[in-house]
Image (cartoon, rainbow, N blue to C red):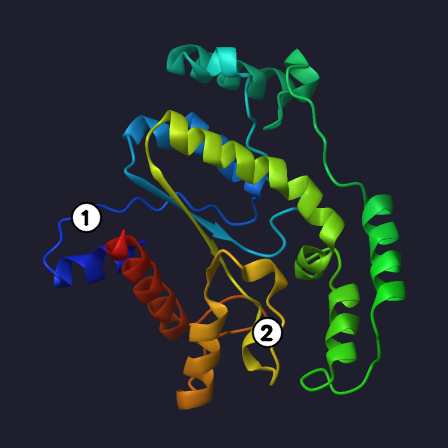
Amino acid sequence: MRQVETIAAAHGLDWQAINAGVGGVTLKNEIAILQETGLSTNPEAVIVGFYLNDFQESPGVYVPQLPSWLGKSKLLTHIIFRLALRRSGSTSLDNVFGLIEHDEIREEDLLRWGKEFEASVPVCQGDFMIAECAFNHLILWNLADWGGAFIPDVWEYLRPLFAELTRLSKQHCFELYVVAFPVRFQVEMPYVRDEPQRMLDLLPMLREAHRVTGAPLYYDHCHMTPHGYRLVAEQVYELLDSH
């Protein structure tokens, strides 16, 4: 987001960008961060950087989402959160107050959906960068990570979370944008698989940059190089500027 602010400044725009990103959290966690602290900044726009495994609960990070009646008081929210941490020794309020109901994707459901996906598409173990069936194999191999985003049932879980973001944007009068990051395989393979990216689609821009320059955009399958992030920042700036 700091790069977006820098690009805007170069165009004479006095934008202030706040990076609220936290590594290893989920879309549900990001909504909680927005409610707990983000809304207090009165944002004009909120950009959700969605990575393809953001449906999965992080084993080490949990940001609690309090009931709406508690969210009306920042002081009460802060006090309850701190008391919970002291009493439970963790970042979860579930065992302390019993206020939060979890409806996470269970491992057995994910495996069942994966088997249904495997039965419905061609799957092979050939050249991962060429054959469509080999990419389906990659999806299954990475089912608990980015591969799950290609499973339709996973989006049944995600849809209410995006609906909640939309509700918050209307209630608090900010523009909502979702930036869905592709994995490296999607950028570099010769054909397009973009089912999860059809929001702000970074994939065409990244594929074109890879085709034209060949400059490294990724360190691994998901973490981008500075050059890659610069291209993303320029795309986000253009989106915001156009609105």
Hey, which residue is sitting farthest left in the picture?
12
Would you say residue 147 is visible in this rendering? yes
| Cα–Cα span, label 2 and label 1 | 32 Å
Residue in the picture at 47% in, 30% down? 167
Residue in the picture at 63% in, 42% down? 158
> Which numbered dot is residue 208?
none
Q: Is residue 193 left or right of residue 34?
A: right
In depth, the one of 88 and 93 nearer the eye is 93
In depth, the one of 173 and 65 nearer the eye is 173
Residue in the picture at 50% in, 70% down? 203
> Which numbered dot is residue 15?
1
Residue 59, x across and y down, in percent: 68, 43
User: On screen, 3 above or below 64?
Assistant: below
Residue 36, x across and y down, in percent: 43, 26
Image-quadrant location for residue 28: top right
Would you say residue 59 is visible in this rendering? no
Q: Amino acid at mark 1?
A: Trp
The residue to which callout 2 is attached is 186
Q: Is residue 115 left or right of residue 1?
A: right
In depth, the one of 201 and 20 nearer the eye is 201
Q: Secondary structure at mark 1?
A: loop
Count numbered badges in the picture. Answer: 2
Q: Secondary structure at mark 2?
A: helix
Residue 216, x across and y down, in percent: 45, 81
